[in-house]
Image (cartoon, rainbow, N blue to C red):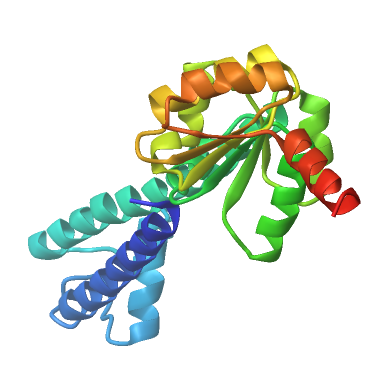
Amino acid sequence: MDVNSRIFAYIIAIIGVVVFGILGTLYFGGKGGFNVPVKGVVGAAYFTMATVSTVGYGDIYPITSSARLFVIALIVIGIGVFFGAIVSIFGEFMESRIERISGRMTAFEKRALNKHIILIGSNTTNMYLAEKLAERNERFILITSEEENAERLKKLGYRAYVADATSELDMSDFEPKKARAIVIDIEDSSRAIYALLVAKEMAGNSKIVVMAPTKGAEHHLRNIAAGKALVVNPSDIAANTISDTLFK
């Protein structure tokens, strides 16, 4: 269950508890189950909230066995639902705050990942791609190995995280199997190669595109890709485009 669904479920449960409390209080209050008659919705709501919140002012209390059993049920159910909601929602918030400081993916964010695009590295191609994806309101995240770079990207309005793209443990946080595509644009050739190896192992049916930093790296990347990833050499494409323009 995603976060929004869980919050909605808790809201429905809380409303259910309040309605149960009000109706039960009106029923038993009208039959002499309490020390004073409770016949109005306001009085029933007051007793319900005082009971569930454990305040218990003592001005209204059950005096019959059936009313006492109702109050016990209201306390058990009400406290369970209310405190469950508080722990769940605020627990997610605190986890988000703590993990965001470290630049890591939070469990809150991880559960929301689906059909997203993973941009590994922040070289020129990925930065242009991020700009285009943002214009199209596409769901994407940026992964960098440097905390300072992640902070810079966040200031630009991107969802950026600190992780080692050559580590399967780190990459598992970003749900590569659920991604629409993974684009690798790392300046260091050896890291680009290792990042591709990890991506191939974890991507499932997700598309993989990798930028070749050099002509030599392109050869190695194509061998590793083995048809399961698209290898692009931006410099080569740019050079061919310029050459075609110059010598038409």
Q: Is residue 60 visible?
A: no
Pick whichever, 157 or 74, lies toward us.
157
Q: Position of residue 199 (x, y in %)?
A: 48, 26
Residue at figure coordinates x 33%, y 61% from the top left:
9
Q: Is residue 216 visible?
A: yes
Q: Position of residue 25 (x, y in %)?
A: 24, 74
Residue at figure coordinates x 67%, y 45% from the top left:
159
Instruction: Decide if residue 99 is on the left or right side of residue 43.
Output: right
Considering every residue shown, the one lying at the far left of the view is: 66
Residue at figure coordinates x 16%, y 75% from the top left:
28
Pick whichever, 205 or 170, lies toward us.
205
Quadrant of the image for the C terminus?
bottom right
Residue 234 in which image quadrant: top right
Instruction: Decide if residue 120 is on the left or right side of residue 127.
Output: left
Pick whichever, 161 or 109, lies toward us.
161
Considering every residue shown, the one lying at the far right of the view is: 246
> Where is 138 relative to 87, above or below?
below
Considering every residue shown, the one lying at the far front of the view is: 248
> Where is 204 relative to 80, above or below?
above
Residue at figure coordinates x 27%, y 86% from the top left:
39
